[in-house]
Image: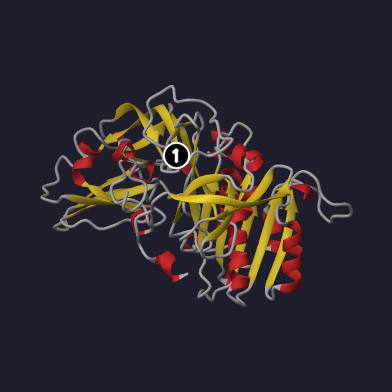
């Protein structure tokens, strides 16, 4: 039974269906652990590495030449804000992995600046994840992860690595940056998996 | 606080307000008694949950302001005008009130007294709070590691912990503090009010060849600007840890 806090009435009862513990925002807050990297587009590359070491790479023009999708998704950040109905354009991870022969169950996502995050490969497939480069009809801002970020909206937003540069496929799971710093390994907002052990 | 480092499941714990202290017109410090609290690593935060009589609950994260301590911690909360939890903590809570917390949380934006490199702290507004925990934790652990704080506030009246900071500059060996004001300065201040810029950071910060560990905390725009300035001055991005809060406000300006 939760403790009732004297004098707290709450600002408003929830009028939309949000994951537990989340509140609605119209802003687009930023959460990053360090300075914003600014990779040079001439040298930018996105790489998929299979568990056998096979590499598949795309330059910036090559990525932009791939068929893209536009999606409207809800974002849920572990810091408790949720933003509904955001518009993105990018390449489905299904497209990037189409020619990759893999038996891996897990993926480590790598970003410029050194950030990493891990997730089951299944969560990146079947229309659930994109490498996104446009937000709300414009090129993605650096502070929101531009030139390109991963977008995995069914998990807490730290899984949607900003400044993404590659996906490494793995047989064994291994924790990424926040997953090593006390945050949940999977991060399902609807099960409120914020911290390790939730 | 060795117990804080042990990976364990974070459960909600009852906390009782022991004391509240007004810091500025919009910020208060709240001392909480939390039986069994394991202490924290400076820079970490806690989650606070408030529950209304009808069962409605809201939770937010707040940085710990105090030095690590067993069974007790202190938060400093700045009122967010249309916020839900901060107005309660900044205006309503009083000694004896009960709420719930869980934590400590966060294993990256942290400073441990075993660290030996010099530390540059850069605070914007209430971003001072986790950095103050580091300053207090340094003194409590008798660390002599050089600490420099660059603290940007709107006006002198908006400076949180002003008296304690001036006392610590006198008493804590190896700590120094430089203020920067964005809206209004004390009389006779050598610089006009303005945003933190490259010239000021070069003057009051530390050169990159000092190789300090850098911690920046504040609103997103402030942190973004300060981090970019420090990178441009040659500080290694990997040595700059940031914690941001608040909306970005202006997407165009960010591009």
Answer left or right for A97 relative to A131: left
Q: Which residue is mark 1?
A: A80
Query: In this rendering, does residue B232 appear at all?
Result: no
Q: Chain of mark 1?
A: A
The location of residue B23, given as percent across then percent down, is 71, 50
Quarter of the image for residue B163 reads: bottom right
Near-viewer residue (B217 or B240): B217
Quarter of the image for residue A86 reads: top left
> Dot 1 lies on which element?
loop
Answer left or right for B148 relative to B213: right
Residue A154 in the image: above or below residue B100: above
Answer left or right for B46 relative to B22: left
Q: Residue at x 42, y 67 (%)?
A: B3
The location of residue B110, given as percent across then percent down, is 50, 62
Residue B182 in the image: above or below residue B215: above
Near-viewer residue (A23 or B116): A23
Count of labels shown? 1
Q: Residue at x 60, y 42 (%)?
A: B89
The location of residue A53, given as percent across then percent down, is 17, 58
Near-viewer residue (B89 or A32): B89
The location of residue A1, given as percent across then percent down, is 39, 41
Q: Residues within 10 Å of mark 1 (few under 14, many from 20)?
A: many
Query: In this rendering, does residue B32 appear at all?
Result: yes
Answer left or right for B213 relative to A56: right
Residue A130 in the image: above or below residue A105: above
| Residue farthest to the right, as pictured | B188
């Amino acid at each position: 039974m939760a403790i009732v806090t004297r004098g707290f009435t709450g600002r408003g009862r929830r009028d939309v269906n949000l994951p537990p513990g989340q509140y609605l925002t119209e802003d687009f807050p930023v959460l990053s652990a360090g300075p914003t990297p600014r990779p040079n587009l001439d040298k930018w590359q996105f790489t998929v590495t299979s568990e056998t070491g096979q590499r598949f790479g795309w330059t910036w023009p090559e990525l932009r030449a791939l068929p893209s999708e536009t999606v409207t998704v809800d974002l849920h950040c572990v810091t408790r804000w949720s933003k509904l109905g955001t518009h993105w354009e990018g390449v489905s991870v299904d497209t990037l992995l189409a020619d990759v022969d893999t038996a891996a169950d897990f993926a480590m996502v790598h970003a410029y600046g050194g950030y990493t995050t891990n997730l089951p490969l299944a969560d990146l497939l079947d229309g659930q994840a994109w490498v996104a480069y446009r937000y709300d009809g414009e090129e993605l801002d650096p502070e929101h992860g531009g030139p390109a970020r991963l977008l995995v909206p069914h998990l807490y937003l730290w899984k949607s690595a900003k400044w993404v540069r590659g996906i490494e496929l793995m047989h064994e799971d291994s924790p990424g940056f926040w997953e090593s710093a006390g945050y949940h390994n999977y991060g399902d907002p609807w099960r409120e998996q914020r911290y390790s052990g939730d | 606080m060795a117990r804080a480092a042990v990976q364990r499941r974070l459960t909600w714990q009852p906390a009782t307000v022991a004391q509240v202290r007004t810091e500025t017109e919009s910020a208060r410090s709240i001392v909480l008694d939390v039986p069994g609290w394991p202490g924290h690593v400076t820079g970490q935060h806690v989650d606070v949950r408030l529950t209304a009589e009808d069962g409605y609950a809201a939770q937010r994260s707040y940085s710990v302001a105090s030095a690590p301590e067993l069974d007790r911690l202190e938060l400093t909360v700045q009122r967010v005008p249309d916020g839900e939890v901060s107005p309660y903590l900044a205006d309503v809570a009083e000694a004896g009130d009960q709420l719930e917390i869980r934590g400590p949380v966060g294993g990256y934006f942290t400073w441990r007294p075993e660290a030996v490199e010099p530390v540059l702290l850069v605070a914007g507004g209430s971003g001072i709070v986790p950095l103050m925990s580091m300053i207090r934790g340094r003194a409590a652990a008798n660390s002599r590691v050089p600490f420099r704080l660059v603290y940007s506030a709107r006006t002198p009246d908006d400076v949180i912990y002003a008296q304690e900071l001036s006392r610590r500059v006198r008493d804590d060996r190896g700590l120094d503090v430089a203020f920067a004001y964005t809206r209004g300065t004390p009389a006779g201040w050598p610089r006009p009010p303005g945003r933190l810029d490259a010239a000021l950071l070069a003057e009051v910060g530390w050169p990159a060849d000092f190789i300090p560990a850098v911690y920046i905390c504040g609103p997103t725009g402030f942190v973004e600007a300060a981090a970019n300035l420090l990178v441009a001055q040659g500080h290694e991005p990997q040595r700059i840890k940031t914690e941001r809060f608040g909306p970005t406000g202006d997407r165009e300006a960010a591009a």
